[in-house]
Image (spheres, helix red, strand yellow):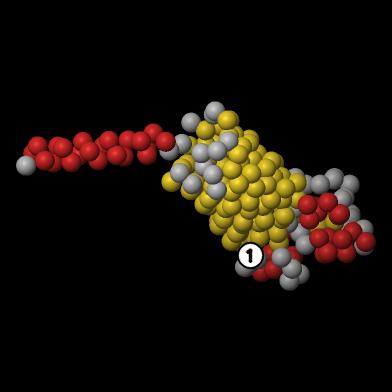
Amino acid sequence: MRFAIATTLAVLGVLIAPARSSAQTSLDAFGALPVDHIASLGDSGIAVDFGGRVSFDALPAVQLFGEFGRLGNVMPPLLETGLGFAGLNLTASAFYGEGGVRLLAAPHSAVTPYVEGTAGVAHLGFGTSGFGSTTDAIVRAALNRVDTRDPIFGVGGGLLMQGGPLRFDVGYHYKRIVANSALSSVIGAGQELQSHQIRFGAGVRF
């Protein structure tokens, strides 16, 4: 009986070992250009998005990851443009944390297409200008005292390039914040708080 148990455990160990050895963890950092805000340049230019993630291989073609980052501006472009005509500027940025799943089309190739989905929580931060220095400071302080933690969801796709321990990523990603707090709903004026990103990333795997 003991021999049978030992033999079974040994066989299971042989079968599981390759899967464990092939599983890898990756650390990545990225920057992203929010293309929906290019047309609404202000004096401060485009507020880029950035962040990082930790991922690991759950299966050869499936990666699970956690991502943290900052969206530089999620204001609806039409609202932002309208305020600009009035000489006013109101920005809404967001720090967020998400979990996600990435599916690889060709996990063992040097270049593989991918698609992914994410879900998490975002915390909004606000900035103003054009009201006058004192009023701007008061409005910013008042807006940022309100707790605005809202759900955030994302989808994306692109190309992942891998060689040795290095990996590079280029693709399109969409982030949407679901405005469930009163303030974020008012700030969005009934429009979506979102970011359409062209993202560039680099990282290492081990």
The residue nearer to you, when weighing 82 against 134, is 82
Where does the N terminus fall, quadrant-wise? top left
| Number of marks present in the image shown | 1
Q: Is 29 on the left or on the right of 20, as rendered?
A: right
Q: Is residue 44 visible?
A: yes
- Residue 141 seen by the camera: no
Determine whether the residue tagged by mark 1 lies in a helix, strand or loop: loop
* Coordinates of residue 145 in the picture (x, y in percent): 67, 57
- Furthest-left residue in view? 1
Identify which residue, 137 or 106, lies in the foreground. Answer: 106
Residue at image x 13%, y 41%?
A: 5
Residue under the image location 63 percent in, 51 percent down: 157
Answer with left or right where residue 195 lies relative to residue 78. Answer: left
Residue under the image location 74 percent in, 65 percent down? 187
**Residue name at image x 92 percent, y 62 percent:** 86
The picture quadrant where one finds residue 31 is top right
Which residue is at the front of the view, 125 or 80?
A: 80
Amino acid of disc 1 = Val
Q: Position of residue 155 (x, y in %)?
A: 62, 56
The answer to which of 122 and 98 lies nearer the viewer is 98
In which image quadrant can residue 146 be found? Answer: bottom right
Give the x, y percent position of residue 46: 81, 47
Q: Position of residue 110 (x, y in %)?
A: 58, 36
Q: Residues within 10 Å of mark 1 (few under 14, many from 20)?
A: some
Residue bearing mark 1: 178
Q: Residue furthest bottom?
A: 190
- Quadrant of residue 159 within the rendered picture: top right
